[in-house]
Image (cartoon, coloured by chain):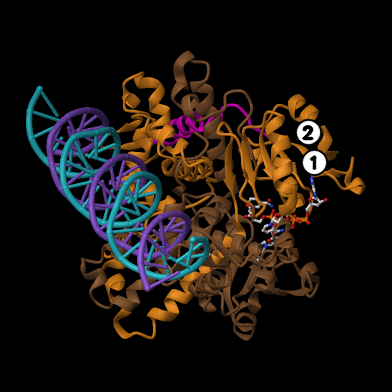
Chain colours: A brown, B orange, C cyan, D purple
Amino acid sequence: MAQRGQSDAAGRTPRAPAENAAEITTPMPTINGNGLRDRARAIPEAAVARLAVYLRVLSGMREQGVASVSSEELSGAAGVNSAKLRKDLSYIGSYGTRGVGYEVEVLVDQIERVLGLTREQSVAVVGIGNLGHALANYGGFPGRGFPVTALFDVDPDLMGVPVGGIPVDHIDDIPKVCAAREVTIGVIATPPPAAQAVCDRLVQAGVECILNFAPVVLQVPETVEVRKVDLAVELQILSFHVARRADHAPDADATPAQRVNGNAPNGVVVRR
Amino acid sequence: MAQRGQSDAAGRTPRAPAENAAEITTPMPTINGNGLRDRARAIPEAAVARLAVYLRVLSGMREQGVASVSSEELSGAAGVNSAKLRKDLSYIGSYGTRGVGYEVEVLVDQIERVLGLTREQSVAVVGIGNLGHALANYGGFPGRGFPVTALFDVDPDLMGVPVGGIPVDHIDDIPKVCAAREVTIGVIATPPPAAQAVCDRLVQAGVECILNFAPVVLQVPETVEVRKVDLAVELQILSFHVARRADHAPDADATPAQRVNGNAPNGVVVRR
DNA sequence: AGCCGCTTGTGAACGCAGGCACAAAGTCGC
DNA sequence: GCGACTTTGTGCCTGCGTTCACAAGCGGCT
Ligand SMILES: NC(=O)c1ccc[n+]([C@@H]2O[C@H](COP(=O)([O-])OP(=O)(O)OC[C@H]3O[C@@H](n4cnc5c(N)ncnc54)[C@H](O)[C@@H]3O)[C@@H](O)[C@H]2O)c1
Ligand SMILES: NC(=O)c1ccc[n+]([C@@H]2O[C@H](COP(=O)([O-])OP(=O)(O)OC[C@H]3O[C@@H](n4cnc5c(N)ncnc54)[C@H](O)[C@@H]3O)[C@@H](O)[C@H]2O)c1
């Protein structure tokens, strides 16, 4: 029960009910209009998420001097099925060598290309509280092509104070600062009531990608991409599994199917 | 293009390739063995994630004195399709009144029941650095039934220091402390290299639900549920959309399909 | 009291994503 | 240079999740 695929509900913040169909179900000629253009669009979002994971694993391998990997090795390290991995990679092209595997260097380059990481994406964080501080101080982003270049808040005490090396600006300066620093991604870490207003400001400043930590459903134009990180929801999903397990376990034969081949009943498994 | 469903790749950390089949494809009598028990298991995980969102929206409504909602209103506020909302709610039972809608109070209670929120889930955070501090200080968790009751780290300077009102313990005390405080959920906020070891300790201490912030694929027994929050991946997905857009935009008619019916064709929507 | 309109709950259809399994393809050994 | 082995790339099939659309059910209005 621990795993299952990994299709899941996630960050995407839906909005109008209609464009759903519009996005993918474009009447039909989805693939006709223009083969090339649709190539990029054709990569399933789930695959994109996994590509990002592969990229991290591959980067680690490259650092350790690994020159080439097979789909089996890479999929193992990334925690996915090898067929899925190959299919994911096939979305971005054919860069493997049959009978051998993939060149780490090549894969890294290609995935970076597809994910748009060849160009650095400048990030702005709005709401420099507990979470905002953590994000601003985090060293993992700049190293991966996402330099945090702007911080915003409304608290007068924070104005000009450098956090993680960057001074905090007032949110009124969002348009000016974002334009100057070519911010492409906005991160919202304000209290929930302020989130929508902050979002609107970012959008007005031309930011088209938003990562939202506030537990609020943001309303945005269709041109803007929002992803939501909702920790309370994550905990509740885990809680659901606890509850489910509680309903299952007491009942004698409830879990046989899983134990049969799932579970190393007595401890074991792991094998990391 | 901004939306689309919200099925996505997400937190689930896969592992062995097999239990997939075990989990859902139980030979067949999935629904036979026992109708009731399978009810709970039958709720799609994607639906569980949305239920958590509905719950938050409903809680807000209740606080504002709203007594009843229609599926249309609620789905609008939650940013989903109304049919999907109704189907999600139908997984947990029939608590609506045709022609009228749902009683807010009832829905809140029922969703809480299904998500296992009737019992408080005690949370432990491991790795009290930037992120760990933010989590420990966050007031949103206790209020939602997830009291943070234990903090762990290895840094001697942190031992005993209270963060968010709770003193930090050494990770060697994980078994003892987790047992005493009945921790059911473990949150990993350590550097990546330490994550697997910490995870193993938590599992050994009997924690069966883990929320992992370290960009690492954790290996766990099948009995343990892991969800991953990977901010770098989130940013990369956003980056992908920037790149995609760059490929699309210059091209004249790239977005017509979406605009055609993408935009709240019949007004509706928005109304925030 | 009965009818009308509104909203739920769900059956059925559709489409995407995942997984299996194999043919194509290229390499290495001899 | 040829054969056999290895691993990729992908066609096909299966199944979940989403959406549509409508019948059933309930309250209110006349
Ligand atoms: N801290 C966590 O671990 C955590 C966990 C889950 C969710 N969240 C969510 O993340 C968000 C931030 O959490 P936090 O703990 O950092 O909160 P916080 O209260 O510590 O910080 C919020 C910051 O936002 C600033 N702010 C307030 N209104 C603003 C506005 N209109 N424009 C710009 N800045 C504004 C405040 O001055 C403050 O610095 C909240 O929505 C919270 O629900 C936080
Ligand atoms: N800070 C962020 O915004 C952010 C963003 C994305 C991901 N992350 C990830 O979250 C994790 C934590 O990030 P952070 O910025 O808080 O790091 P940090 O370095 O600030 O804190 C890490 C903490 O873990 C403790 N630690 C180290 N080894 C440990 C061990 N074996 N057992 C227990 N504790 C141990 C350290 O003492 C330190 O207090 C990292 O894996 C990071 O990649 C953080």
Establish whether ligand 2 lies closer than 8 Å to the Cβ of label 1: yes
Out of B177 and A188, give the one closest to the viewer: B177
Is B106 one of the magenta-colored residues?
yes
Q: Residue A202 placed where, x, y %?
A: 55, 73
Out of A140 and A10, give the one closest to the viewer: A140
Tell me if residue A239 comes above or below residue A56 in the rendering: above
The numbered mark at residue A211 is none
Residue B267 in sight from this viewpoint: no
Proximity of marks 1 and 2: CB atoms separated by less than 8 Å = yes
Q: Residue at (68%, 28%) from the top-left corner?
A: B206
Tell me if residue B245 comes above or below residue A155 in the rendering: below
**Total tally of numbered discs in the picture:** 2
B230 sits to left or right of B129:
left
Per the image, the residue denoted by label 2 is: B174
Chain letter, disc 1 residue:
B
Residue A56 in sight from this viewpoint: yes
Establish whether ligand 2 lies closer than 8 Å to the Cβ of label 2: no
The residue carrying pointer 2 sits among few (fewer than 14), some (14 to 19) or many (20 or more) residues within 10 Å by Cα, namely: many
Tell me if residue C7 comes above or below residue A117 in the rendering: above
B270 sits to left or right of A205:
left
Q: Amino acid at mark 2?
A: Ile
Q: Secondary structure at mark 2?
A: helix
Out of A177 and A137, give the one closest to the viewer: A137
Give the quadrant of the C terminus of chain A: top right
Q: What is the magenta range?
A: B103-123
Q: Quadrant of ligand 1?
A: bottom right
Per the image, the residue denoted by label 1 is: B152
Chain letter, disc 2 residue:
B
Q: Residue A101 placed where, x, y %?
A: 50, 63
